[in-house]
Image (cartoon, rainbow, N blue to C red):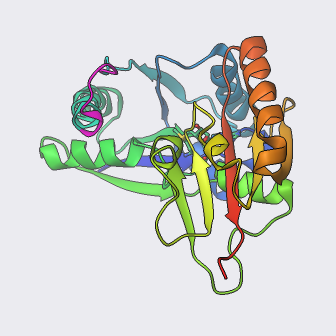
């Protein structure tokens, strides 16, 4: 039976790649690279660096083109579901066509496959279509929240407390119910600025694990403008930006 490995490769530092991930990559005959339209040359280069650094053989690399996604649709969830279904079709053909019956293929997943990544959901859809059988395994990677916590030297939870991971889109609708510690990803609009008047601290990191890494922390009201400026200058300079942050609200008395 064919095997498909979903390998988390960390959030930007090639040294995030675990021993388990290296062993998995070395089992693969084919590395599938799911291209993303918005992806920059730099992210593609990082992926190649990981392969060159750690893979001893020379697995074939197969690029999987990214189907178009309707970003204009107000029905975000439906648009994403439709895009995943189109990806499942492309991936099914590639797994069937590129792997021998007992072959092993690997998908490189940025960070960890369990956090805001669709690779696992698309693979589940390929299996649910019922046209192709294969075994699949997930190899965890260092996620951007973990990289942030380490670089900021913080723990996410306070004693016995809960932590919520959410998106900038959700945060811009208001502070999440029931949480005092909130990790925010996928925020293109600096949603933290709306809490500038509150007793909230931010621990922010951009390009974590790379040579361009930027870190800032402090009371949101004091550092929000600086972060916004740094973010937009970096984005201008490099053409892309990825940032993650923790918002920590003082406990209500
Ligand atoms: C599609 S999600 C992928 C998350 C990934 N699976 C993970 O485990 O980190 C992309 C988001 O992850 C965060 N991210 C990924 N890499 C990052 C990095 N090196 N520095 C800061 N944030 C990063 C950003 O919030 C970005 O918008």
Q: Nearer the viewer, residue 83 or 214?
A: 214
Q: Nearer the viewer, residue 155 or 35?
A: 155
User: Does 244 sit above or below residue 137?
Assistant: above
Residue 127 location (% of width, % of height): 21, 48
Residue 150 location (% of width, % of height): 81, 59
Left or right? Give the position of 184 relative to 221: left
The stretch of residues the image draws in magenta is 70-77
Q: Residue at x 24, y 33 (%)?
A: 75
Q: Residue extending furthest bottom?
A: 160
Residue 103 location (% of width, % of height): 38, 41
Left or right? Give the position of 213 relative to 186: right
From where the camera sits, is residue 54 visible?
Answer: yes
> In which quadrant is the C terminus drawn?
bottom right
Residue 123 location (% of width, % of height): 31, 45
Splitting the image into 4 quarters, where does residue 146 fall?
Answer: bottom right
Q: Nearer the viewer, residue 56 or 134?
A: 134
Q: Main secondary structure of the magenta part?
A: loop
User: Does 151 sit above or below residue 28?
Assistant: below
Q: Quadrant of ligand 1?
A: top right
Q: Is residue 169 magenta?
A: no
Q: Residue at x 13, y 41 (%)?
A: 131
Left or right? Give the position of 66 relative to 148: left
Q: How many marks?
A: 0
Q: Residue at x 59, y 44 (%)?
A: 25
From where the camera sits, is residue 23 visible?
Answer: no
């Amino acid at each position: 039976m064919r095997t498909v490995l979903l390998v988390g490769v960390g959030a930007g530092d090639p040294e995030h790649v675990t021993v388990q991930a290296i062993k998995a990559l070395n089992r693969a005959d084919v590395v599938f690279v799911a291209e993303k339209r918005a992806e920059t040359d730099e992210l593609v280069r990082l992926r190649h660096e990981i392969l060159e650094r750690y893979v001893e053989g020379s697995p074939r690399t197969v690029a999987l083109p990214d189907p178009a996604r309707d970003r204009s649709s107000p029905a975000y969830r439906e648009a994403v579901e439709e895009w995943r279904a189109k990806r499942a079709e492309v991936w099914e053909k590639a797994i069937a066509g590129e792997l021998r019956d007992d072959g092993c293929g690997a998908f490189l997943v940025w960070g960890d496959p369990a956090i805001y990544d669709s690779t696992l959901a698309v693979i589940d859809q390929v299996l649910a279509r019922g046209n192709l059988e294969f075994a699949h395994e997930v190899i965890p990677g260092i996620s951007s929240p973990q990289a942030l916590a380490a670089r900021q030297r913080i723990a996410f939870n306070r004693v016995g407390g809960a932590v919520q991971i959410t998106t900038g889109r959700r945060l811009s609708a208001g502070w999440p119910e029931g949480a005092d510690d909130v990790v925010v990803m996928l925020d293109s609009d600096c949603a933290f600025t709306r809490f500038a008047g509150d007793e909230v601290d931010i621990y922010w990191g951009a390009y974590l694990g790379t040579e361009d890494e930027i870190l800032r922390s402090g009371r949101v009201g004091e550092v929000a403008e600086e972060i916004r400026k740094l973010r937009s200058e970096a984005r201008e300079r490099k053409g892309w930006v990825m940032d993650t942050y923790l918002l920590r609200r003082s406990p209500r008395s």
